[in-house]
Image (spheres, rainbow, N blue to C red):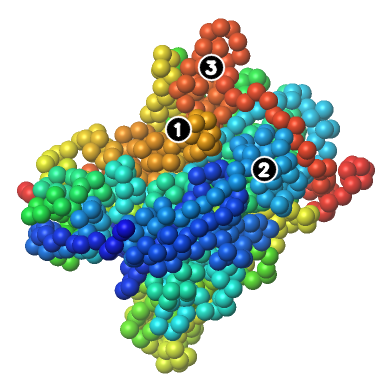
Amino acid sequence: MSKKRFDVVGKPRRRVDGRAKATGHLKFADDLSAPRMLHCKLLRSPHPHALVESIDTAKAEKLPGVHLVLTRKDFPVPFGIMPVSLDEHPLTDHARHVGDPVAAVIAFDEQIAVEALNLIQVTYKKLKTISDPEEALASPEPRIHDYGEQGNIHRNQSYEFGDVDEALANADHVFEDLFFYQGNTHLPMEQQATLAQVEGDGKLLVTSSTQNPHYLHRQLARVLQMNAAKIRVIATPNGGGFGGKCDPANHEMVVAKAAVMLGRPVKICLTREEVFYQHRGRHPVLMKMRTGVTKAGKLTGMHLQTLLDGGGYGSHGPASTFYTGVLTPVTYDLPRFKFEACRTFTNKPACGPKRGHGTPQPRFGQEVQLDKIAEKLKMDPAELRLGMVNKPDSLTANWLKIGTIGLAECINEVVARSNWKTRYRQQPHGRGLGLACSTYMCGAGLPIYWNKLPHSGVQILLDRSGQVTVYCGATELGQGSDDVLATIVAEVLGIETGMIRCVTGDTGTTPVDLGSYSSRVTIMMGNAAMQAAERVRDQLATATGEQLEVIPSGLLFSNGKVFHAESGKSVDFLEAIQFAEQKFGTLGALGSYSPPKPPGKYKGSGVGPSPAYSFSACVVEVEVDTNTGWIHVPKIWIAHDIGRTLNPVLARGQVIGGVYMGLSEALMEEQAFRRLPPKLSSALVHRMPSMLEYKSLTALDMPDVDVALIEDPDPNCPFGAKEVGQGPLLPVMPALANAIFDAVGVRIDEIPVTPDKVLRALDLKSKGLTPRVGPDHFPSVPYPEPVYVATPAEGGDGKESKKHAAAAVV
Amino acid sequence: MSAIPERVHLKFQVNGEDAPVSFAPYKTLLEVLREDLNLTGTKHGCELGECGACTVLLDGEPVLSCLVLALECGGRRIETIEGLARGAALHPLQAAFADFGGSQCGYCTPGVIMTAKALLDKDLNVSREKIREATAGNLCRCTGYLQITEAIEDAARVLREERK
């Protein structure tokens, strides 16, 4: 087709679902009801670690209005998001954390269900509580799970890309730092809800606030032992997800089972407290970083060790564990890299993927350490980074293929906009600027379960009315995936997004898309949509060319018309559809997408590869009150390498939203636990399972944010558009910590950075001690012998090799 | 022993219309709106008065409907997101939220819009600071609030122009 200027790409416009959201029309999962619907409530363990010795449901079953009581015996088959962590039963007889569900009541209404829960008598045998990773390492017994590496170690791994000991020995300086990143949770505004019902055709319909209807579909078939073709999952638009609705969840399994057993619709909506127990949020991670640097400010190598607090279940943990290291070499030239990671089980709600999945923690450490390196080398932190930015189309030491990289432009942009050069290190005591950078994937290169099928499919149907309907399994979480879908199809067909109807997130009607996670939707769904749209466009062009007696390739689709520029002939889009329907019959096309094969060939190389990487740079300004430790953030500058902006309103919204969530994590958010006093059982409980006490930024706390979108279209992405949903969160936390140092000369090497820590560090400084607050030791972790892989630069072939053999090649 | 509860009958005035309704007497206004009047546009994020998602106007004042007993609302004027549009046309607040990114997932949107309506009903020349203060009780996890503030400012501008 002829090249044209963009019709919709890059133009600010109302999102396709904007109207429904502003009018209250949009139906979220808990807005749904059905005739004869019953309500479900879950009985949750008050103990962090206990076996259910007996459970008596007789009294509950007799309560008028109660229809069904379910327990562990009703669910023989376990589930989990990853094939290697099928470790959850919808209702358990081994409680792994306070809040783990052990029984369910299905009743006329929620009130009766709650009363019935109180009538269930459970005898627990309490087990020793494993409260943190150090305790998990020291206590192989009792085991929280009977699988994993050993004792209470869930995952344990070690990789070495090039000889890192040698790299550190050859460095002019070796920096060794410990960092800690506290866990936090997604806190979506919408509490999870699910409605399950058997439809008129006898098939099960589960409508749920899930990010990943496809994975839920698979796990429902597994747990219910039903033919997947007889189950339909509809993902309602999520009231925020941020990773918290990626895992298939207990409550989804329970209401599905109950609906099948009772033949009546069954709904559940979690209370806010229960949302904190469902969790799957940011892992608390302890990190040790040893980094070699030359006098000139070039990295020679890094040895990164991480220790993750996984909580009570596997969840996405195997992937999370990899993500605490694998993206570390993507921003800067890091010739050699050794990465050891260990995830332990503990008796807390399971951790999983939260926006940035496993990467914010090491990025925080890496970017704060770079600030320390710049300080030591007396270099400007921006110049230090600019001198080591990775090259486009290069391979990292751990075999990740970088495509376009706009990181240098991002750094230059925030440096210019914040007047960095005249303000950094030059402001009065108490006021400071901090800089940090980051990167994120545009979708994971491999699916969660091993298969060679497409990652995303899109179907487009057109008919003589002019209607264009686009079907895809991707899920709208608020991130704008429906708008992305409409934009790409509209651009190819030269029509407005308002002309398109998106049908998404329905396993009963839409082609499979793996889900809304890992920032994959724009790229994967987008490429599938592009292929489908180009196929129907070609049909329209062939038929229209025939009618207009012109060559189809000379036709241009724009502005609701199909033009032939040379002859000046044109028809309306509607006419073109009618020509094509007449010629080809009922019109439609399918598109699908599979990401490129990753270059790494070693075991474990599947985590980290992506079709493209986005990049961000951020400057945070702080004002620190040295009397109270209070941190005020007046302004943040952020530049994000987005490849191409599809809808500037939404892109800017994603950037600001990411900055908000990052700053909120940096300053206050904590999924923290405490021991109840002995007279109250000593149980390890969530410190603040409520929205009031789990602090997050409000409209009053939010600083001004200056957003720059850097456009360097990436050839692997639709119209060159990379992700924007997760990347912009990542540099905010280290930039904040670096700004604190510029302001008052103290290092807070852990997240969140709270006033009490700032005061403690200031106190140390006033006493002439090292002005730092952060972890003081890294426990002995039995990491395995590393898998050694020679780096691309040292002639490796991407496969595991013997360390000395590889050295001989060099 | 519990049983299916008896219902009370009351008449509210909802979005300018009489709304007779019967409900279990322990229910909150939020529950009656959503479950008994089928007005699910009003959302909930905590049901403890912490998040602002369930904000509606009661006799013109913003209230957290999860903390209001429905029994107290007989004969009173209730405004919800469903009553805001002017026929088929969006209220300027709704249009601005849709156009300027004030709404991402949309879950907090009805509550914020009702809070903003109460604010703008009193003062169309409201400052940015006042907007931020008024909406500080409405948590939002998506937008980072800036585009919410911008949308309310734009709606105020449109409403001022309408008034001229």
x then y, percent, for residue A602 = 79, 54
Question: In the image, A748: left or right of A240?
Answer: right
**B1 relative position to A163: left or right:** left
- Count of marks placed on residues: 3
Residue under pointer 2: A344
Residue in the picture at 77% in, 55% down: A603
Residue visible at 56% across and 71% down in the picture = A224
Chain letter of the residue beneath label 1 in the structure image: A
Q: How far apart are marks 1 and 2 (CA)?
A: 25 Å
Distance between the Cα atoms at labels 2 and 3? Answer: 30 Å
SS state under label 2: strand
Q: Quadrant of residue B12?
A: bottom left
In this figure, which residue is indicated by the disc labeled 1?
A668
Is residue A116 shown above or below A458? above
Instruction: Please tell me if label 1 and label 3 are on a single chain.
Output: yes
Q: Nearer the viewer, residue A538 or A15?
A: A15
Q: In this view, does A489 lie above or below B13?
A: below
For the point 88% across and 43% down, which residue is it? A803
Subunit of label 3: A
Q: Which one is nearer the viewer's eye here, A68 or A800?
A: A68
Q: Tell which tag, 1 or 2, sits nearer the viewer.
A: 2
Image-based side of A762 in relation to A339, left or right: left
Contact between marks 1 and 3 (CB within 8 A): the answer is no
The residue shown at (65%, 37%) is A133
- The disc label shown at residue A761, or none: 3
Image location of residue A545, percent across then percent down: 45, 85
Which label sits in the foreground, 2 or 3?
Answer: 2
Q: Earlier in the sequence, mark 2 or mark 3?
A: 2
Q: Earlier in the sequence, mark 1 or mark 3?
A: 1
Which amino acid lies under the numbered mark 3 shown in the image of this protein? Ala
For the residues labelled 1 and 3, the Cα–Cα distance comes to: 17 Å
Q: Could you confirm whether marks 2 and 3 are on the same chain?
A: yes
